[in-house]
């Protein structure tokens, strides 16, 4: 099976977690896009979605799914999204698609985070994938210097402006063996909007696409 077929399999498998008449939290990226396609097939059974990016909002709307403002929603049953890496503690690196801040907000609102990944995203220790950090533009150089002090090598993601009007630093070679400590430390740097470490709030369920089928981790 190709990687995209594995992503499609987990995107559709996530439908099992969607309850009727609920508003569904929806992530961003190529795996989440398969989930949106799947959601389109049951659109008459749900109230709608809260979206983590302009791109996902456009796709949801093109399928006729109502998109709610997150401020209109008190609680979400589930949030379904991909990840760039996930470890055995269900902690993740996210933000390869630059949507990390809105993803973290919706994950915080949701009761359950359903992570959908192909097996290549499973790692023992996070950090081979460069860690995305969303930064207020005027703080870019300062935050980069602070990240160097933490042992990382930040690289400015050229030409990318997030949906919130900010920039992304991708941090290479950071030691993320204590993911909660690193998340808290980077979140404390002035000018950081969000770090793409989802360790304090990890996934509750991971659906992993493998050659032997979709595996469920809890
Ligand atoms: C976007 C994300 C995505 O979930 C992550 O990059 C995985 O993307 P894909 O499903 O395309 O492999 O965090 O900000």
Image: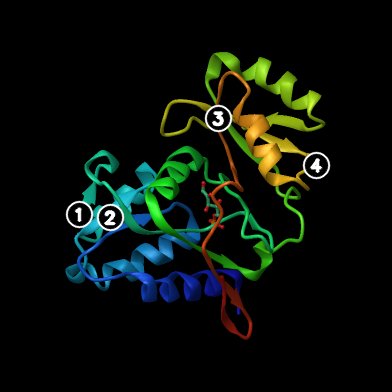
Q: Which of marks 4 and 2 is nearer the N terminus?
A: 2
Q: Residues within 10 Å of mark 2 (few under 14, many from 20)?
A: many
Closest to the observer, 15 or 91: 91
Are circles 1 and 2 on residues that touch, CB within 8 Å?
yes
Say which element carries label 2: strand
Are circles 4 and 2 on residues that touch, CB within 8 Å?
no
Residue tagged 3:
159
Query: Where is the N terminus found, in terms of image quarters?
Result: bottom right
- Mark toward the viewer: 3 or 4: 4
Q: Distance between the residues labelled 2 and 3?
A: 29 Å
Q: In this view, does 111 lie above or below 171?
A: below
- Mark toward the viewer: 4 or 2: 4
- Mark toward the viewer: 1 or 4: 4
Q: Earlier in the sequence, mark 3 or mark 4?
A: 3
Residue tagged 4:
175
Q: How far apart are marks 3 and 1 (CA)?
A: 31 Å
Q: How crowded is mark 3: few (under 14 residues within 10 Å), some or many (20 or more)?
A: few
């Amino acid at each position: 099976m190709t990687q995209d077929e594995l992503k499609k399999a987990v995107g559709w498998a996530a439908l099992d977690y969607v309850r009727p008449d609920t508003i569904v939290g929806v992530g961003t990226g190529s795996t989440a896009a398969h989930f949106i396609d799947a959601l389109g097939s049951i659109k008459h059974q749900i109230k709608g979605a809260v979206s983590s990016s302009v791109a996902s909002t456009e796709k949801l709307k093109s399928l006729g799914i109502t998109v709610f403002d997150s401020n209109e929603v008190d609680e979400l049953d589930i949030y379904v999204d991909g990840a760039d890496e996930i470890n055995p503690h269900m902690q993740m690196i996210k933000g390869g698609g630059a949507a990390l801040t809105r993803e973290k907000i919706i994950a915080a609102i949701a009761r359950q985070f359903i992570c959908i990944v192909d097996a290549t995203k499973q790692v023992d220790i996070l950090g081979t994938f460069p860690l995305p950090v969303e930064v207020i533009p005027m703080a870019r150089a300062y935050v980069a210097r602070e990240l160097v002090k933490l042992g990382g090598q930040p690289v400015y993601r050229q030409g990318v402006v997030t949906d919130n009007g900010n920039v992304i630093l991708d941090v290479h070679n950071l030691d993320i063996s204590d993911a909660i400590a690193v998340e808290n430390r980077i979140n404390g740097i002035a000018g950081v909007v969000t770090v793409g470490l989802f360790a304090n709030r990890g996934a509750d369920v991971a659906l992993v696409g493998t050659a032997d089928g979709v595996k469920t981790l809890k």
